[in-house]
Image (cartoon, helix red, strand yellow):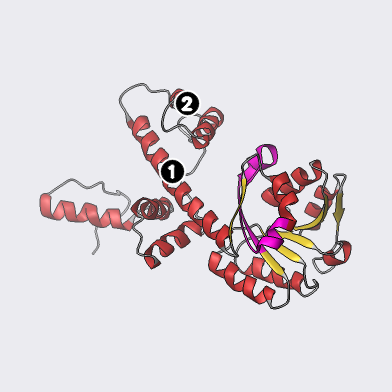
């Protein structure tokens, strides 16, 4: 079937390739013309020069998948397209939008007769090869109409219509919150292994635990790949960890719902800590331990005492 794809970055570009390999016709646009031309070099892809011209190249009812950063870029893109769409057309938001924004946008678009389908998408750079896990929210009729697209993108069992508008992005938000906790647990465990006095081979252990262990996972497979590429010391990689926003939204939702989520919350805090060149809180603790217990402090010799 035919659809439009807006946003051709690491996810959108790879998704386009997977779609055309399964026989779909894709009309593409990226704000970077060079990216649009690169993706359009594949057979089955039609480029357009502007967002506004995309609906003209699509047959009715039109389906446009939007894969741009969450927040204002997504909202602006959806409503710029909606201004040129007709009743019965469908917009799919495959980004990491806040589910509250999705519910609000869905209601606004519904007043125009345009369907908004939210497709929480997981799979990263590996999705083109192995498929994407799709958590889809939206009206039953609109989702059913888009199912050939979802089934081409997902592996067997990797697509589900999880509920009404907003449910897909809500499910993806919780998915990413869980991911935060899993990553933090693996990180702490492997730091303990790394700090051990035993001559442990961390690449070997990552591989070992993927054979019969209860903690085996795809994340451990990726860690093994990372160790093979970078070495166990990871000296080339700075310990600075960003967050996409979904971890924050998960923690805020837990607060709103009075649901205890200490692991996810602390994993988010650990990411904040990773961005400090020097932790002032740790400095305060060191100073206090010295004051009440006479514990030794690590002193920066380049900084003289005040006064």
Q: Nearer the viewer, residue 53 or 58?
A: 58
Q: CA distance from mark 2 to mark 1?
A: 18 Å
Query: If the image is split into quadrants, where does the C terminus sit?
Result: bottom left
Stretch in magenta: 117-144
> In front: mark 2 or mark 1?
1
> Residue 305: x, y in percent?
24, 58
**In the rendered image, which quarter is residue 36 located in?**
bottom right
Please report the residue visible at 26 percent of the width from the left and 46 percent of the height from the top.
298
106, above or below 162, in the image:
below
Q: Nearer the viewer, residue 186 or 64?
A: 64
Q: Is residue 280 left or right of residue 220?
A: left
Disc 2 crowd, CA 10 A, few/some/many (<14, 14-19, 20+)? some
Do labels 2 and 1 touch, CB within 8 Å? no
Q: How many marks?
A: 2
Q: Which mark is residue 278?
A: none
Q: Residue farthest to the left?
A: 293
Q: Is residue 130 magenta?
A: yes
Q: Nearer the viewer, residue 112 or 273?
A: 112
Q: Is residue 31 visible?
A: no
Q: Is residue 254 left or right of residue 222?
A: left
**In the rendered image, which quarter is residue 251 located in?**
bottom left
Please report the residue visible at 70 percent of the width from the left and 41 percent of the height from the top.
128
Q: Secondary structure at mark 1?
A: helix
Q: Is residue 98 magenta?
A: no
Residue at which label 1 appears: 182
Q: Residue farthest to the bottom?
A: 111
Residue at which label 2 appears: 203
């Amino acid at each position: 079937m035919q659809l439009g794809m807006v946003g051709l970055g690491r996810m959108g570009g790879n998704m386009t390739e997977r779609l055309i390999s399964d026989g779909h016709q894709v009309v593409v646009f990226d704000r970077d013309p060079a990216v649009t031309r690169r993706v359009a070099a594949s057979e089955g892809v039609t480029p357009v020069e502007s967002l506004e011209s995309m609906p003209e190249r699509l047959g009715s009812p039109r389906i446009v998948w939007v894969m741009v950063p969450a927040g204002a870029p997504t909202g602006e893109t959806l409503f710029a397209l909606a201004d040129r769409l007709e009743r019965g057309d469908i917009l799919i938001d495959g980004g990491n939008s806040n589910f509250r924004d999705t519910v609000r946008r869905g209601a606004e678009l519904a007043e125009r007769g345009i369907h908004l389908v939210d497709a929480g998408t997981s799979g990263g750079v590996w999705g083109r090869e192995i498929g994407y896990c799709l958590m889809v929210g939206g009206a039953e009729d609109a989702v059913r109409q888009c199912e050939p697209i979802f089934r081409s993108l997902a592996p067997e069992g990797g697509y589900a219509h999880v509920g009404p508008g907003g449910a897909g992005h809500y499910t993806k938000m919780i998915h990413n919150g869980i991911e935060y906790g899993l990553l933090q647990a693996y990180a702490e465990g492997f730091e303990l292994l790394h700090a051990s006095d035993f001559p442990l081979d961390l690449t070997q252990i990552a591989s070992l635990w993927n054979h019969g262990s209860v903690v085996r996972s795809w994340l451990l497979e990726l860690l093994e790949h990372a160790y093979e590429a970078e070495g166990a010391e990871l000296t080339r990689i700075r310990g600075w960890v960003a967050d996409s926003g979904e971890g924050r939204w998960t923690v805020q939702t837990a607060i709103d719902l009075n649901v205890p989520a200490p692991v996810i919350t602390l994993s988010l805090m650990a990411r904040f800590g990773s961005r400090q060149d020097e932790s002032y809180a740790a400095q305060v603790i060191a100073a206090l331990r010295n004051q009440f217990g006479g514990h030794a402090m690590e002193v920066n010799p380049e900084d003289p005492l005040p006064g």
